[in-house]
Amino acid sequence: MSVRVATVADAHEVAQLAAQTFPLACPPGTRSEDIEHFISNVLSARNFEAYVADSARAVLVDETADSGLIGYAMLVSGTPADPDIRAALSQHPTLEISKLYVRPTEHGSGAAARLISSALSHAREAGCTGAWLGVNQQNVRAQKFYAKHGFEVVGTKTFVVGVQTHDDYVMQARL
């Protein structure tokens, strides 16, 4: 098992993984058509090709020789556009961990820990003093995972999936 930076050649497999894992992080009651719309419009192979090529982003993948890609994380450099998020963050420069998902069969395997550790290392290497992410307020399991890795709640934000707006916590880690 190893974490590496994704290439354009990985885009299709990352998109398949994203389509499998994104619904797991959605709060109960999220409409399936909204989830499908988000997957089609944000998590497509074409979009992952663009994400991998974007100099302000890094897509990390965790893979095994037997199973292929088992998890991924998307990192976004730069100052957050949302003024409420900017106001909540105390560490600058910062890096957003925009996405971090692992196949359900790999939960508890250490894959998510490898990805978060690699993401934080990437942020340090980029000269950041902090990293932040948004996590749904109902996703207690993810909140506990991030807290275990040094993140704390510093604010709130919204996240739109289709026609539904969800409430997220903004969590930050000092590096």
Image (cartoon, rainbow, N blue to C red):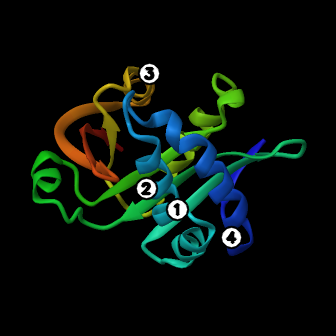
Q: Identify the element where label 3 is drawn.
A: helix
Identity of the amino acid at label 2?
Ala
Q: Nearest to the eye among marks 4 and 1: give it.
A: 1
Is label 3 or label 1 in front?
1
Q: Earlier in the sequence, mark 4 or mark 2?
A: 4
Label 3 – label 1 distance at C-alpha:
26 Å
Give the crowd class for mark 3: few <14, some 14-19, many >=20 residues within 10 Å: few
Q: Quadrant of the C terminus?
A: top left
Residue identified by numbered label 4: 7
Q: Kindly identify the amino acid type of the residue bearing the numbered disc 1.
A: Ser
**Crowding at label 4, few (<14), some or many (≥20) Cα neighbours within 10 Å?**
some
Q: Position of residue 155 (x, y in %)?
A: 16, 38
Give the distance between the C-alpha atoms of the residues marked 4 and 2, in whole angstroms: 19 Å
Residue to which mark 2 is pinned: 123
First along the sequence among labels 2 and 1: 1
> Alpha-carbon distance for marks 2 and 3?
24 Å
Residue 165 lies left or right of residue 113; in this view the side is: left
Q: Residue at x 34, y 37 (%)?
A: 135
Quick one: SS at disc 1?
A: helix
Amino acid at dot 4: Thr
Q: Amino acid at mark 3?
A: Arg
Instruction: Assess whether mark 2 and mark 4 are in contact (beta carbons under 8 angstroms).
Output: no
Residue 90 shown left or right of residue 161 in the figure: left
Compare marks 2 and 3 and give the one earlier in the sequence.
2
Mark 2 and mark 1: Cα distance apart in space: 29 Å
Q: Nearer the viewer, residue 103 or 60?
A: 103
Foreground disc of the pair 4, 2: 4
Q: Which residue is mark 3?
A: 141
**Residue that numbered label 1 is attached to:** 40
